[in-house]
Amino acid sequence: MDKTGNEGAGNGGAATGGVTIGDAAKASGVNAKLIRYYESIGLIPQAGRTASGYRLYSPAEVHVLRFVRRARGLWFSIEQIQTLVGLWRDRDRSSAEVKRVAQAHMDELEAKIAELTAMRDSLRRLAEACHGDDRPDCPILHDLAG
Amino acid sequence: MDKTGNEGAGNGGAATGGVTIGDAAKASGVNAKLIRYYESIGLIPQAGRTASGYRLYSPAEVHVLRFVRRARGLWFSIEQIQTLVGLWRDRDRSSAEVKRVAQAHMDELEAKIAELTAMRDSLRRLAEACHGDDRPDCPILHDLAG
DNA sequence: ATCGTGCTTCCAGCGATTGGAAGGTCAAGG
DNA sequence: CCTTGACCTTCCAATCGCTGGAAGCACGAT
């Protein structure tokens, strides 16, 4: 409870060049369990280990985690993030490729927005027609029943 | 291949008052596998059976399936549909209850639309700033990297 | 009798997490 | 030294709404 914040249960941090998963989680905003999951599916490379098996994360690796978290926040799929991380790592790659991934994702978002909006609109029309009182008849059900 | 369309592999249909699951699927638009799944989770009641164990569906039951399908098409959750089906069956229930479910669902849709729109907008801003050519620097990656 | 289709059950997986159990490890306090 | 408690490890299961496959009956037609 009285942790000072920068070094958890680990082996000392800077000397071996990494923090434990808990600290990496705090620093990146990605849950420790999720970090292990990301490693298991190959989104991030396998972390180094201490002699006793604890995972260790360098500042660069924490940075990648933060990157992943932001991309997830923008609803990129894991697959898309995998591509983006690759592009990010490889600074020599062209920005055209990045833009293409972003554009594809935007198209997906756009489609989903349109779909949801259509749903909301038809539902709104039905709800407006539904008097919403004690009477049992309701156009919402009527419409769903076809 | 030369099926006439109204009676499949079943036992004759109208005599026992029901069609088999395949025909119910065709008539309702709900996949046979999905119908069984819906039964297994209790969304629809257990279907009657022939002597040999085939499920049989009355027109009314097919109607329920169609109802479910439409509601799913509006992205209602299974739980919400369960409520709606109950309300639909029970004609004496007030329309206020239906309207409440619909409103709750619309609120969910609205929230998701807002979220997706925000994502799309920030992504669009980034993409516009990305020159998208051979040069490696790209504000999209820059922003994700934080 | 045999073919082809449809039906049955069960089991497993998708994507992206989240949760828990069972056990090892660490630093600190008594 | 030994306990405490926070942390770490792995593995397995659940979520939600399906979808797929495998193995085995049932049916109608040839």
Image: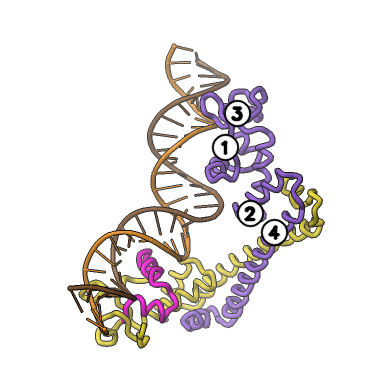
Chain colours: A purple, B yellow, C brown, D orange
Labelled disc at residue A89: none
Residue that mark 4 sits on: B119
Coordinates of residue B93 in the picture (x, y in percent): 44, 77
Q: Chain of mark 4?
A: B
Badge 4 and badge 1 both on one subunit:
no
Compared with A46, A115 (above or below) is below
For the residues beneath circles 2 and 1, the answer to whether they share a chain is yes
Q: Secondary structure at mark 3?
A: loop
Camera-near label (3 vs 4) is 4
Type of residue at label 1? Gln
Residue A60, by quadrant, is: top right
Which label's residue is closer to the chain start, 2 or 1? 1
Residue B93 appears in view: no
Local SS, label 2? helix
Q: Amino acid at mark 2?
A: Gln
**Residue depth check, mark 4 versus mark 1: number of the one nearer the observer:** 1
Residue shown at the point (35%, 85%) measured from the top left: B3
Number of residues whose C-alpha sits closer than 10 Å to that of mark 4, classed few (under 14), some (14–19) or many (20 or more): some
> What range is drawn magenta here?
B19-42
Name the mark nearer the viewer: 3 or 2: 2
Q: What percent of the width, then of the height, locates residue A36?
A: 54, 40
- Which residue corresponds to mark 2? A80
Q: Which mark is residue A46?
A: 1
Other-residue count near label 3 (Cα within 10 Å), few / some / many at <14 / 14–19 / ≥20: some
Q: Amino acid at mark 3?
A: Gly
**Residue on which disc 3 sits:** A8
